[in-house]
Amino acid sequence: MKVKVLLFASLREVVGSSQSAVELEPGARVEDAWARMASLYPRLAPHTGTIAFALNSAYTSAREALHDGDEVAFLPPVSGG
């Protein structure tokens, strides 16, 4: 299945683009999409464990199942004052 990936802030800078797409096996989860992106872009790996996930515009957990055509977003921690 094919999943659209959106990347924000520092993650976008690492990849050099705000969007990508990954092919995943049926039954894959959000965490599998992240693992695939981290394997394609090793500089993403240090962000594992600190990012938030969204699936089809709603925050979700890493264990959420994906379906063909889904849109998954990876968001780094936000700081501000």
Image (spheres, rainbow, N blue to C red):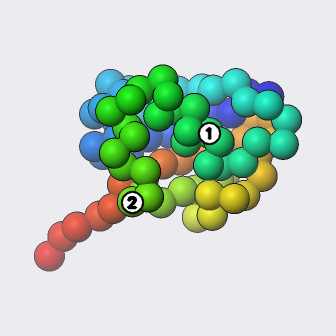
* 51 over 21 or under it: above or below: below
In this rendering, the answer to whether 22 lies above or below 48 is above
* Residue picked out by circle 2: 50
- Residue shown at 28% from the left, 43% from the top: 10
Label 1: how many Cα within 10 Å (few below 14, some 14–19, many 20+): many
State the residue in front, 25 or 12: 25
Q: Position of residue 22 (x, y in %)?
A: 63, 26
Q: Residues within 10 Å of mark 2 (few under 14, many from 20)?
A: few
Please tell me which residue is depicted at 36% across the width and 49% down the height of the picture: 47
Rendered residue at 22%/67% (across/down): 79
Q: Secondary structure at mark 1?
A: helix
User: In the visual, does 54 lie left or right of 75?
Assistant: right
Q: CA distance from mark 2 to mark 1?
A: 15 Å
Any mark on residue 33, and which? 1
Position of residue 57 measured from the top left corner of the image (x, y, whole percent):
61, 56
Q: Is 33 placed left or right of 51 in the picture?
A: right
Mark 1 or mark 2, which is nearer the start of the sequence?
A: 1
Residue that appears at 48% across and 48% down: 74
Question: Which SS class for mark 2?
Answer: loop
Give the farthest residue toward the right. Answer: 26
Q: Is residue 48 above or below residue 26?
A: below
- In the foreground, 31 or 57: 31
Residue type, label 2: Thr
Determine whether, in the image, residue 9 is placed left or right of residue 33.
left
Q: Confirm or deny contact between disc 2 and disc 1 (CB under 8 A).
A: no
Residue 75 horizontal/vertical position (percent): 42, 53
Does residue 73 appear to the left or right of 12 in the view shown? Answer: right
**Residue 49, quarter of picture:** bottom left
- Total tally of numbered discs in the picture: 2
Question: Residue 1: horizontal and vertical position, in percent?
Answer: 79, 28
Q: Amino acid at mark 1?
A: Ala
